[in-house]
Amino acid sequence: MADFDLGGIFFTDQSANNGAGERLAGEGDSDYLPAKAQLKYREFLRDFRREEEYIYRSLLRSAIGLKQYVVEVDIDHLMMWDAKLGTELLRRPGLHLPLFEKAAIE
């Protein structure tokens, strides 16, 4: 008999990967892995501004204060911030919206 399965526990945590190996944009573009896309969404929410106003930073603060967990994001703002990321969001919303939501929670 083979003893390959005695005394060992083997598992893979599929939720921890979160699709991190999947490419989002071009095959050679490492900036668009899901983990990096989430970081870019986070940077966008924190750093995007019109003139001197940080639009989404203040919207998130007020939404949390009012216990309203909805913030509208203008896709044109995202396209101005990073056109490739905005295009990916429009092309694959099922993958990108959860990443965007996680970035907003952070």
Image (cartoon, rainbow, N blue to C red):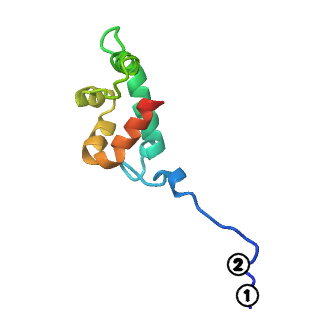
User: Which numbered tag is attached to residue 33?
Assistant: none
Q: Please, what secondary structure does the residue beneath circle 1 have?
A: loop
Q: Please, what secondary structure does the residue beneath circle 2 have?
A: loop
- Look at the image and tell me in which quarter the N terminus lies: bottom right
Residue pictured at 24% horizontal, 27% vertical? 74
Residue pictured at 37% horizontal, 49% vertical? 24
Tell me where residue 12 appears, x and y as whole percent: 58, 61
Residue at the farthest top position: 52
Is 15 positioned to the left or the right of 64 in the image?
Answer: right
The image shows residue 59, relative to residue 12, as above or below, that is above
Tell me where residue 55 appears, x and y as whole percent: 33, 17
The amino acid sitting under disc 2 is: Asp
Q: Are marks 2 and 1 in contact (CB under 8 Å)?
A: yes
Residue at the farthest front position: 67
Look at mark 2 in the image and give the residue it sits on. Answer: 5
| Viewer-nearest residue: 31 or 22 | 22
The image shows residue 17, relative to residue 62, as above or below, that is below
Residue 4, by quadrant, is bottom right
Q: Distance between the residues labelled 2 and 1?
A: 8 Å
Residue pictured at 35% horizontal, 8% vertical? 52
| Viewer-nearest residue: 92 or 24 | 92
Look at mark 1 in the image and give the residue it sits on. Answer: 2
The amino acid sitting under disc 1 is: Ala
| Viewer-nearest residue: 8 or 28 | 8
Crowding at mark 1 (Cα within 10 Å: few <14, some 14-19, many 20+): few
Tell me where residue 14 appears, x and y as whole percent: 52, 57
Crowding at mark 2 (Cα within 10 Å: few <14, some 14-19, many 20+): few
Residue pictured at 39% horizontal, 25% vertical? 45
Tell me where residue 40 appears, x and y as whole percent: 42, 33
